[in-house]
Image (tube, rainbow, N blue to C red):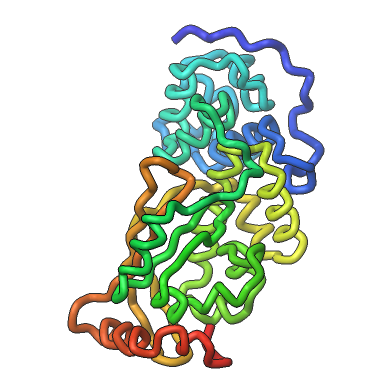
């Protein structure tokens, strides 16, 4: 495969400034760290290369090995890993993604970091709005906890049963209606989710995806900076550079009023605004969780006003 020329980069081998401390997220630094982190998780045996047992100064594949697998020169890949992706072609990115064994979400993230979004971006500071018919749909879903989540993990709208399950977000300032803030900074949400670590991982992975799409979003950068200062767990997970999208799964919770809840969730991206997703939860018919949801539905918002409720 031919190398597509990249201009020589004066950038140091590793950016000195942490992206979480800058006014906006540094796309070049993000690209550099992401490629390093993906290369570090692979071993020669994972990709069919011989390992002669020599001491490795860095974990994972060497740059030379990765360049060989991707079919590009070492100098070309080195410039890319230093954050210079301005002129890289889609063909080369595809080859590097295959060599690194990236998932679909990781491949998309790499493309956003290297080339930016191909479509016209919405202004990052513009408030996110939920269409009125969509808000009406939420209200009509009486037996299903549901909410709309937007960029930066912001909770934009929700129905009564979601308030009964997760807490009445209407009682919070708008800036606090954010899954990242709730998960990492509120002890009651740590108690709510049985597998809190997985919930935290999912949120950080989605924030990483947002950062790749909107590196100039100063509100996102401020959120990352605040959480990095206030939460050691967030700092640890943010440093992994992991990205993924979860469209469905199972969440186990311990609700202070009804006890254990095992709910399946489904996430649906809005066709006219892919930054927004409708998230719904439901229980297996006839299960104890289904009965618990019916009980919470009968209490409505009163369930979220009990002092001990999450």
Which residue is at 39% across, 61% downward? 279
Task: Say if 198 sits above or below 274 in the image.
Answer: below
Task: Say if 114 sits above or below 143 in the image.
Answer: above
Which residue is at 79% across, 19% downward? 10
Q: Quadrant of the N terminus?
A: top left
Between 50 and 48, the residue placed more toward the observer is 48
Between 237 and 24, the residue placed more toward the observer is 24
Residue 165 appears anywhere in the view: yes
Between 253 and 293, the residue placed more toward the observer is 293
Q: Residue 68: x and y, percent?
A: 49, 19
Q: Is residue 15 left or right of residue 276?
A: right
Q: Residue 283: x and y, percent?
A: 27, 75
Task: Say if 107 sits above or below 297 in the image.
Answer: above
Q: Residue 136: x and y, percent?
A: 37, 62
The number of discs equals: 0
As drawn, which residue projects farthest toward the left? 286
Which residue is at 78% across, 42% downward? 23
Q: Is residue 199 left or right of residue 18?
A: left
Q: Residue 295: x and y, percent?
A: 33, 89
Task: Say if 271 sits above or below 88 in the image.
Answer: below
Q: Is residue 250 left or right of residue 168?
A: left
Which residue is at 40% across, 85% downward? 300
Residue 57 appears anywhere in the view: no
């Amino acid at each position: 495969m031919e190398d597509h020329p990249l201009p020589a980069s004066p950038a140091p081998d590793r950016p000195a400034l942490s992206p979480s401390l800058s006014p906006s997220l540094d796309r070049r630094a993000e690209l550099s760290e992401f490629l390093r982190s993906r290369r570090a998780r692979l071993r020669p045996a994972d990709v069919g290369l011989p390992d002669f047992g020599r001491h490795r100064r860095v974990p994972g594949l060497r740059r030379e090995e990765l360049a060989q697998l991707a079919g590009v020169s070492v100098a070309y890949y080195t410039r890319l890993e230093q954050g210079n992706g301005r002129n890289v072609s889609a063909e080369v990115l595809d080859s590097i993604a295959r060599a690194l064994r990236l998932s679909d979400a990781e491949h998309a993230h790499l493309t956003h970091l290297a080339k930016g979004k191909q479509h016209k971006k919405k202004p990052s500071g513009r408030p996110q709005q939920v269409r009125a018919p969509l808000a009406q749909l939420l209200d009509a879903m009486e037996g299903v906890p549901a909410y709309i989540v937007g960029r930066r993990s912001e909770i934009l709208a929700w129905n009564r049963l979601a308030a009964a399950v997760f807490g009445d977000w209407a009682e919070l300032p708008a800036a606090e209606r954010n899954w990242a803030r709730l998960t990492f900074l509120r002890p009651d949400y740590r108690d709510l989710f049985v597998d809190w670590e997985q919930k935290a991982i999912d949120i950080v992975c989605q924030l990483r995806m947002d950062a790749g799409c909107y590196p100039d979003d100063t509100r996102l950068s401020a959120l990352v900076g605040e959480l990095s200062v206030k939460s050691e767990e967030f700092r640890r997970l943010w440093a992994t550079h992991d990205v993924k999208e979860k469209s469905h799964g199972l969440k186990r919770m311990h609700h202070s009023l009804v006890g254990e809840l095992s709910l399946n969730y489904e996430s649906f991206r809005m066709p006219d605004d892919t930054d927004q997703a409708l998230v719904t939860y439901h229980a297996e018919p006839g299960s104890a969780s289904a009965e618990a949801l019916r009980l919470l539905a009968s209490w409505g918002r009163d369930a979220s006003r009990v002092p001990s409720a999450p």
